[in-house]
Structures are given as C-alpha cells and as structure tokens.
Image (cartoon, helix red, strand yellow):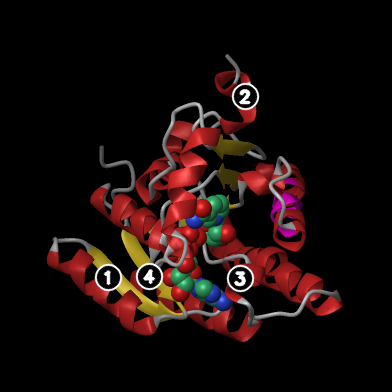
Amino acid sequence: MRRFEGKVALITGAAHGIGRATAVRLAAEGASVAVADVDTDAAGQLAAELAGDGGSAIALACDITSRDSVDAAVAASVDRFGRLDVLAQVAGHNLANRTEVEPGDDQWARQYDFTFTGAVRCIEAALPQLVASGSGAVVLVGSISGVVALGTNPYAAAKAGLISLVANLAAEHGPSGVRFNVVAPGTIATRAFANRPQALEDLKAIYPLRRVGQPEDVAAAVAFLASDDAAWITGITLPVEGGLTTGPGHLIG
Ligand SMILES: NC(=O)c1ccc[n+]([C@@H]2O[C@H](COP(=O)([O-])OP(=O)(O)OC[C@H]3O[C@@H](n4cnc5c(N)ncnc54)[C@H](O)[C@@H]3O)[C@@H](O)[C@H]2O)c1
C-alpha cells in the first residue's frame, strides 16, 4: 500500500517505540516524514535510515511541553516539504514511571501539561496547514488506561482527556475537512518496559490474544486512521489492545 504518496506527516516522539514504528510505516507507504523528538540524535539516525531506504525524511528537535519548540518544528517541516497532511502526536510517557515527579499537585499538573496540553500545542501549531491540505488528519496516541482503570491516575486521566478533545475538534473542524482521532493502545513492548521485562511477560495473561502489543500494531492503526481509508471516520477512539476491554471471559474456566 502507498496510501501516503505525495503527503507529508509530522510525527512527534518519532525517535523511539510507537512513534518510530509510525514513522517507518508512513514512510514505507510513501509519506515524506518529519521525525520530531527531544532525542535529536536518535531522530537524526532514523531520518537518515528512512532517506537511505529511498524515502524523504527530516529530523526536527521538538519538545511538546514548549509551544515555541512545537511551533518551530511545524514551521521547519513546512519549510522543508511545503505542506502538512498528517499530524501523529505520539510523544509521551507516564511521568510516575520515570520518577520525575513527586506525587501531589505537581504530578497532576505536569502530567496534564505533557500529555493533554502537549497534544493541544501540536494541533494548534499544525491546524492551519492541515486545513490547507484539504484532507488533513490528526491521530493522537492515547492509552487504554484512559478508557478503563489500570491504576495510574494522572497519566490515565490526562489520556482520557484526549478522547473528549478529538470528539470536540472533529465536530468543530469537520467542515474544514480535517479529521481527529485517537488510538488507545494496551501494553506495548517499548523501552517504557526496559526496566521491567517481567511485567511484559506477566501482562500477557490479561490479554485474550495472549500477547502484548508491538509498536507496529499501533503504527498500523495510526496509519489507517491517518489515511484516506478512514476518510469518513472522525472523532473516535480506536482501542488497539488485543481484546483487553472485551472483559475477563478468557480468564474464567
Ligand atoms: N508502551 C506502552 O505500553 C503504551 C501503552 C499505551 C500508550 N502508550 C503511549 O504511546 C506513546 C509512545 O510511547 P512509547 O511506549 O513508544 O514510548 P518511548 O519512550 O519508546 O517513545 C516515546 C518518544 O517520545 C519522545 N519524547 C519524550 N518526551 C518528549 C517531549 N517532551 N517532546 C517530544 N518528544 C518526547 C521520546 O524521546 C521517545 O522518542 C506515549 O504517548 C505513551 O503514553 C504507550
């Protein structure tokens, strides 16, 4: 499939994990890709790999907690490629897992700023270009923990906010032809679990498909929602979670 031939995608958090797999997938389908990340070394390596494979890619420094940084990344991408059709907002993690914050007001505020307002910054920066595209698409990477209780409150609540955000933006900007959707992954084997490999093994049991997800599982869903195959789908949250939310039937009997 070459669903993104002639299109340009900006992907945040594209240096590692789900964002990286998304960049690889969209590039393989013909997109020119802006690899945007705080890890500029890894972003540069990926952009070089994509270009080496015959694609068109640029690495951009982008910190989604800074409006200036996000605005500059979008501007640099448009400077380079002349248009923007797809925004995939993937950057993020649970701050509590990386001991960057103390529990309390600071944790709530910083997680919300990172996960929710970070997505808003990216959307606001990209929106004029997405409208100009004529078939712009935004895909936000949320989490299944924003849909069902999995035990990390600030992160889960901030991810849940994205569900309402895309519904409202879809209604507001539908007439401009821009679509907004969320993918909500279950457990995905990325470096987020680098320090807890046993957790990935243990978590297989809660999934009816008896495995955790791979970054490519999410990338495929992002690519679908970003593509014209999803031209009449907007404002939704697509679970990508191996059947987790079907209920505990597979654990019984
Ligand atoms: N791994 C999972 O089980 C899982 C499950 C559900 C949702 N998610 C979500 O998927 C997304 C990607 O997670 P992952 O597991 O691939 O993580 P990852 O750590 O492998 O990749 C995250 C990327 O985001 C970048 N990043 C971090 N802070 C940034 C910032 N301020 N601005 C720009 N880039 C930044 C990192 O450098 C990295 O390249 C996150 O939004 C995460 O919440 C992950």
The magenta stretch is 158-163
Count how many numbered circles sit on residues in the image: 4
Q: Which residue is mark 3?
A: 125
Q: Which x, y percent locates residue 132?
A: 53, 58
Q: Earlier in the sequence, mark 1 or mark 2?
A: 1
Distance CA(mark 3)–CA(mark 2) = 37 Å
At 60% across and 46% down in the image, what residue appears?
A: 182
Classify mark 2: helix, strand or loop: helix
Classify mark 3: helix, strand or loop: helix
Q: Which x, y percent locates residue 52?
A: 13, 67
Q: Earlier in the sequence, mark 2 or mark 4?
A: 4
Depth check, front residue: 119 or 2 = 119
Q: Earlier in the sequence, mark 4 or mark 1?
A: 4
Classify mark 4: helix, strand or loop: loop
In the rendered image, residue 112 lying in the magenta stretch gets the answer: no
Q: Is residue 40 left or right of residue 120?
A: left
Pointers 4 and 1 in contact (C-beta within 8 Å): yes
One can see residue 171 in this view = yes
- Disc 1 marks a residue whose amino acid type is Leu
Callout in the foreground (3, 2): 2
Q: Which x, y percent locates residue 33?
A: 34, 63
Classify mark 1: helix, strand or loop: helix
Kindly identify which numbered label has been placed on residue 246.
2
At 64% across and 80% down in the image, what residue appears?
A: 100
Distance CA(mark 3)–CA(mark 1) = 23 Å
Q: Which x, y percent locates residue 185?
A: 54, 45
- Disc 2 marks a residue whose amino acid type is Thr
Q: Quadrant of residue 40?
A: bottom left
Q: Residues within 10 Å of mark 3 (few under 14, many from 20)?
A: some
Q: Does the magenta stretch mainly form a helix, a strand or a loop?
A: helix
Q: Which residue is mark 1?
A: 46
